[in-house]
Image: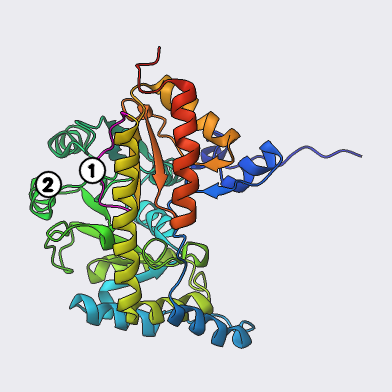
Amino acid sequence: MTHAPRPLAKLVDDLPATVPFVAPEALERARGGEFQVRVGANESPFGPSPAAREAMAASIGRTGWYGDPDSHDLRHELAGRLGTTAAHMAVASGIDDLLGLVARAFLDPGDVAVTSLGAYPTFNYHVHGYGGRLHRVPYRDDRNDLPALVQAAKETGARLLYLANPDNPTGTWWPGADVERLLDALPDRCLLILDEAYADFAPEGTAPRIDPDDPRAVRVRTFSKAHGMAGARIGYAVASEPVVAAFDRVRLHFGVNRMAQAAALASLRDEAFIAWVVAEVARGRDEYTRLAAGLGLATLPSATNFVAIDCRTAEGSEAALAALGEEGVFVRRPQAPPLDRLIRVTVGDERERQAFAEAFTRVVTRLGLTQKVG
């Protein structure tokens, strides 16, 4: 006996069968082997700090317990460091989770959200998933076009504007004062989502001065990058008390596990380790820049843990991506023009950087990427 499939909700049924990213594990299964160099997902090759590792190990015996649904200790530690209160802090399972909370809390079906064309795709995924409509603004000179984003928010009556600063996938950034001017120019109903995943790597003055009580902005940060805890899935938002209270109405209260909370708290206190990671990443960025220059290629300025290398054309970057994959090297490539001429390479550890340099040199030489392709 067969049964008819149960109908999906119309919103879900109308969505395309897609995910924001194809995971490296899926790519490995498709190619029939593991990548030897994994520098495509902006993970930290340095991992969590020794203190965070100890905290996780100490928590293993209590894995049978749920994590604290309020993330009390971590929220208070974050608040003390940021000069605010725990009521302004929301902890969730990474920035991806937080972006979903913002979309769910502020978008009604049909509402518009503004973002850059080619920017972090998980935001788009959540907007579509909660019935919103996207308006995309092209990058200008490989940076988010702040005036155009504001203008789009005004013209569309947008409820949300998403900005990553420093940016992913370009690595470029705007000074905090420019972000403050963008915030002041937004229409009244529009909320700024400021993604600061790479803030630890950014130069002084990149972070804008936004009062935690300001209802116009939600700032989201992560322990996935400088803190090396991408697999633990933990991040946090700084927002006004009413916004944090709204998240409490819809968030998964036991979504952040006990070990992640303990590790994040310990990592915050291990400032020397984070400073070492930031310095090592800066050294690696310089190595990538010199490597590309020696091959006749340009790189974009970066305030992140990756470097975008300009392969001149979309055809060139696509060929480089495929050739590096054949070499066992995992990198990523933006899909939207004009960024589709780039490949994005995470700063690996010393071994990974050397292996990437050797493979990339072979690829560039074989493909003739120093000459315009197409």
Residue 303: percent from left, percent from top? 25, 51
Quadrant containing the C terminus in the rendered view: top left
Is residue 260 shown above or below 351? below
Is residue 4 shown above or below 90? above
Is residue 367 shown above or below 182? above
Q: Which of 14/78 is in front?
A: 78
Tell me which corner region of the image, top left, top right, bottom left or bottom right, holds residue 281. bottom left
Judged from the image, the secondary structure of the residue bearing numbered disc 2 is helix
Magenta segment, prevailing SS (helix, strand or loop): loop
Quadrant containing the N terminus in the rendered view: top right
Judged from the image, the secondary structure of the residue bearing numbered disc 1 is loop
Question: Left or right: 133 with respect to 366?
Answer: left
Q: Which of 100/360 is in front?
A: 360
Residue 319: percent from left, percent from top? 49, 24
> The residue under label 2 is which amino acid type?
Leu
Q: Quick check: is 282 in the magenta stretch?
A: no
The disc, 2 or 1, on the residue closer to the chain's N-terminal end is 2
Q: How much space separates mark 2 and mark 1, taking CA atoms? A: 22 Å
Residue at label 1? Answer: 301
Q: Quick check: is 297 in the magenta stretch?
A: yes
Q: Which residues are magenta?
A: 296-304
Residue at label 2? Answer: 182
